[in-house]
Amino acid sequence: MTHGPSEGSGEFGTGWYLRVGPMGTLGDGLWSVRCYLTNDYPDGTTIGPGVDDSAYPEDRVLWRVGVDAQLRRRVSVARWAVEGVPPLWAVEIPDEGGERPGCSLVVFDTDDLPPGTVLTNDEFASIAVDSAQQVAALHWSTDTATIDQIFVSPQLRRQHVGTWVVYVADALHHHHGWPGLMTASGRRTDVAEEAQGRHLHRVDPRTERVVIIDPDTGIAAP
């Protein structure tokens, strides 16, 4: 049975995922995905590919991940979800040699790439941007989808940058087809607390306020 959008309600629902199709041009096991916010499926449900998506409302798409004309990955986050966020792009860096699988997302605000572009580490090495120019970062465990670190530069706080980073990480997690739903533990900084986004039911209550010391200034970050 085909499920259509919720009728008669202007409220956004839970988050579920539509696999539009495989992205074989970038390698096996990668997916073009959209995240919808409606009540048509239980939270975290993944459907597709091969589903007729014509009945689903475009204005309920929270994010989508695909490729651009240069076959670089691109994540588009709905403007209403991160209103006022500056143009950002990112680099995805898988962990190497750790006890468990994980991944980092390092974010930049330069004009070298279109907003939402996500590079691999090898692709990043080919452009004239230094890693010291990063303005935000997030790390998560890819086997559990648990966020354990997030940082936003002081000059970009209170601009929904942290929320944007969480949504892009969520998109990449589903792009890879990794297990689990993006969640956060109870140990969080103030920045992480503000970056929870619209999936609050996936976030444990904060049990400890974590403080990160900026290594350059020695000052505690919020």
Image (cartoon, grey):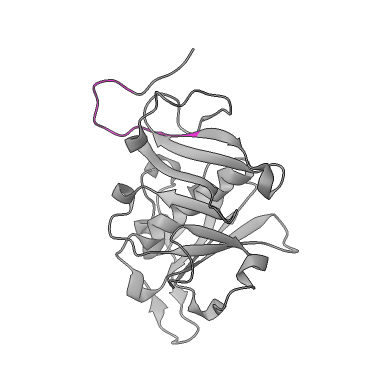
Could you say which quadrant of the image residue 84 lies in? bottom left
Q: Over which residues does the magenta segment extend?
A: 6-17
Work out whether 81 lies above or below 126: above
Secondary structure mainly formed by the magenta segment: loop
Q: Looking at the picture, how far across and down is residue 11, in whole percent?
A: 26, 32
Q: Looking at the picture, how far across and down is residue 216, in whole percent?
A: 48, 86
In the image, 77 versus 15, the foreground residue is: 77
Could you say which quadrant of the image residue 32 lies in? top right
- View extreme (top): residue: 1
Residue 9 magenta-highlighted: yes
Work out whether 219 lies above or below 201: below
Q: Looking at the picture, how far across and down is residue 222, in whole percent?
A: 36, 71
Left or right: 141 with respect to 156?
A: right
Residue 204 magenta-highlighted: no
User: Is residue 124 in view?
Assistant: yes
Q: Residue at x 73, y 59 (%)?
A: 99
In the image, 107 versus 20, the foreground residue is: 20
